[in-house]
Image: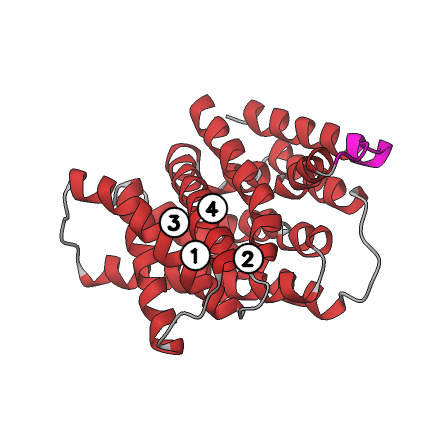
């Protein structure tokens, strides 16, 4: 069970670092092109692991769920998130997109009858409080904020499907096929990938690697401890992203940032104690 928490934290670090990487990679290209470029590299990174483990056949019901999960997570959810990043600052988009734990808790209880414990509720509330007190940048980001909130809902729906898929398929299969499906849909939409050196590096090489590590860690964590436990931990990414940004930019951590980090620690502690 502890391994599931560790993997969820790794995923959170990937999401936190990814916000700044993706925003830089999206300069000069559309969110659709950026998503396609990222998806192609993730597929390439994960392919060797799938090839080694072998390819298996599945029924139409599993295939449909896999397609639905890919659409909700990477096609709809990530496109909304990337569009939000183009319109708003990372410090606005990432926290709002990270409100998905509340959706997961509600949907998990509705679909699977999962017990919503006091620890899980408190953990989610602590995460939301943490992302609220993280210092925000000024500026007009209303439209981007709405897109981020819609991305959170789409991701939450995908996570509910993940709970079922992880009982049937391996982690690498789920990660590979979902990203391959997303790549195919995006390519059918744009028919080509327009990129420059910067977008290739940050959306493709680096962004793809961060996404591959984050996706594999996240899916494995869901398999081990369930989406209702993983989502509050992974949603700490805005705080992690804020801390990494301040270290990278040689800026001092503010009292608000340190307070948010402490709330994140408490949220992980409560989730760990709910096993």
Q: Is mark 2 on a helix, strand or loop?
A: helix
Q: Residue 191: x percent and y percent?
A: 35, 77
Q: How far apart are marks 1 and 4 (CA)?
A: 9 Å
Pointer 2 local density, CA inside 10 Å: few below 14, some 14–19, many at least 20: many
Check disc 1 and report the residue beneath it.
38
Q: Distance between the residues labelled 4 and 2?
A: 9 Å
Can residue 113 be seen in this snapshot? no
Residue 86 placement, left or right of 72: right
Relative to residue 172, is residue 93 depicted above or below?
below
**Magenta stretch containing residue 32, yes or no?**
no
Assess whether mark 2 and mark 1 are in contact (beta carbons under 8 angstroms).
Answer: yes
Check disc 2 and report the residue beneath it.
25
Pointer 1 local density, CA inside 10 Å: few below 14, some 14–19, many at least 20: many
Q: In which quarter of the image is residue 131?
A: top right
Check disc 4 and report the residue beneath it.
206
Mark 1 or mark 4: name the one nearer the start of the chain.
1
* Magenta extent: 250-259
Q: Distance between the residues labelled 3 and 4?
A: 25 Å
Q: Residue 25: x percent and y percent?
A: 55, 57
Assess whether mark 2 and mark 4 are in contact (beta carbons under 8 angstroms).
Answer: yes
At x 36%, y 63%, the residue is: 182
Q: How far apart are marks 3 and 1 (CA)?
A: 21 Å
At x 31%, y 68%, the residue is: 184
Q: Distance between the residues labelled 3 and 2?
A: 28 Å
């Amino acid at each position: 069970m502890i391994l599931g928490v560790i993997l969820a934290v790794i995923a959170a670090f990937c999401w936190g670092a990814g916000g700044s990487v993706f925003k830089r990679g999206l300069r000069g290209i559309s969110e659709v092109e950026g998503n396609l470029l990222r998806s192609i590299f993730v597929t390439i990174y994960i392919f060797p692991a799938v090839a080694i483990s072998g390819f298996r056949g599945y029924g139409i019901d599993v295939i449909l769920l896999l397609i639905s999960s890919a659409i909700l997570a990477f096609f709809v959810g990530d496109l909304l998130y990337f569009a939000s990043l183009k319109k708003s600052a990372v410090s606005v988009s990432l926290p709002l997109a990270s409100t998905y734990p509340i959706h997961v808790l509600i949907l998990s209880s509705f679909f699977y009858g999962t017990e919503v414990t006091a620890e899980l509720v408190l953990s989610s509330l602590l995460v939301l409080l943490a992302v609220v007190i993280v210092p925000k940048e000024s500026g007009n980001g209303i439209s981007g904020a709405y897109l981020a909130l819609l991305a959170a809902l789409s991701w939450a729906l995908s996570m509910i499907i993940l709970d079922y898929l992880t009982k049937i398929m391996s982690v690498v299969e789920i990660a590979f096929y979902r990203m391959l499906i997303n790549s195919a849909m995006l390519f059918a939409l744009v028919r080509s990938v327009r990129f420059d050196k910067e977008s290739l590096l940050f959306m493709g090489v680096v962004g793809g690697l961060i996404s591959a590590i984050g996706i594999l860690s996240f899916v494995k964590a869901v398999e081990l401890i369930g989406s209702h436990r993983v989502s509050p931990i992974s949603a700490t990414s805005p705080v992690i992203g804020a801390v990494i940004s301040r270290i990278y930019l040689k800026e001092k951590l503010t009292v608000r940032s340190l307070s948010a980090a402490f709330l994140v620690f408490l949220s992980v502690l409560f989730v760990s104690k709910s096993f």
